[in-house]
Amino acid sequence: MKEVFIFILIFLIVFVFALVIFNGRFLYAQFKYHSLGTPPMSDEYQKYTSIEHTNIIQKQKLTRPDRIIIPKIGVDAPVILPQGTSEPLLQKALEKGTIFWPESSLLGENGTMVILGHSSAYPWYQGQYGSIFSLLNQLQPGDEIILIAENKKYKYQMVGKEIKAPEDFNIQRETDKSTLYLISCWPVNTAWKRIAIKAEKL
């Protein structure tokens, strides 16, 4: 009986140690958020605070975002157009920021846009965006999401949150409004489910 207890104790210690190691970035981000509050925005963010916000749908002027900003959770990252939708190409693009899903609608038109990002990464991950979406779960309805393109701001407001298996996701294709989905793997360091934040253009 004593041997069984020792085995279980060692197993739990190793399990907790592995959990902390492999989820370090996510756990650190969650700890900072709950203990220090909203993360400070980068110096880069300051240059976007005074630029024009546009809420006009202009069919003739379509563009994709080149930056995403979420003040509530301290996100300020590039939006990258991947060279394809294969897993290696997506992973390569995620090293440089978040991903604009190629089949998404563009800014300046009604439709549905999808942006993907990592929620966590292994300790040896080289890029600085391995946990860029680690705090998506902290967003609440009403929180602001800002997309930047050609020195203009496009503001969205969070309206919903879903956590589902990938095969259960049904992203509604809008035709009469501009909708944004932010998607990441969930729980962290698994591909088991996805967390999706839905936002609508202001």
Image (cartoon, rainbow, N blue to C red):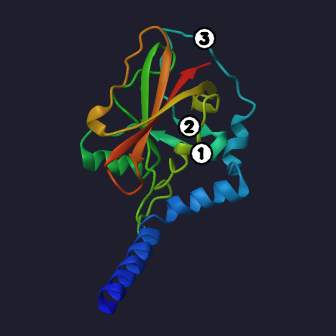
**Mark 3 falls on what kind of element?**
loop
Give coordinates of residue 68: x percent, y percent: 56, 37
Residue located beneath label 2 in the image: 68
Query: Disc 2, disc 1: CB below 8 Å?
Result: yes
Mark with earlier residue (1, 3):
3
Residue located beneath label 1 in the image: 75
Image quadrant in which you'd find residue 175: top left
**Mark 2 falls on what kind of element?**
strand
Q: Amino acid at mark 2?
A: Ile
Q: Callout 3: few (<14), some (14-19), or many (20+) C-alpha neighbours within 10 Å?
A: few
Distance in Å between CA atoms under marks 1 and 3: 25 Å
**Mark 1 falls on what kind of element?**
strand
142 relative position to 94: left or right: right
Q: Amino acid at mark 1?
A: Val
Residue drawn at x 64%, y 47% is 74
Give coordinates of residue 191: x percent, y percent: 31, 50
Residue located beneath label 3 in the image: 56
24 relative position to 3: left or right: right
Find the residue positioned furthest to the front. Answer: 1
Query: Disc 1, disc 3: CB below 8 Å?
Result: no
Q: Nearer the viewer, residue 88 or 137?
A: 137
Distance in Å between CA atoms under marks 2 and 1: 7 Å
Judge depth for marks 1 and 3 and give the one in front.
Answer: 1
Find the residue positioned furthest to the right. Answer: 50
Q: Amino acid at mark 3?
A: Ile
Query: Disc 2, disc 3: CB below 8 Å?
Result: no
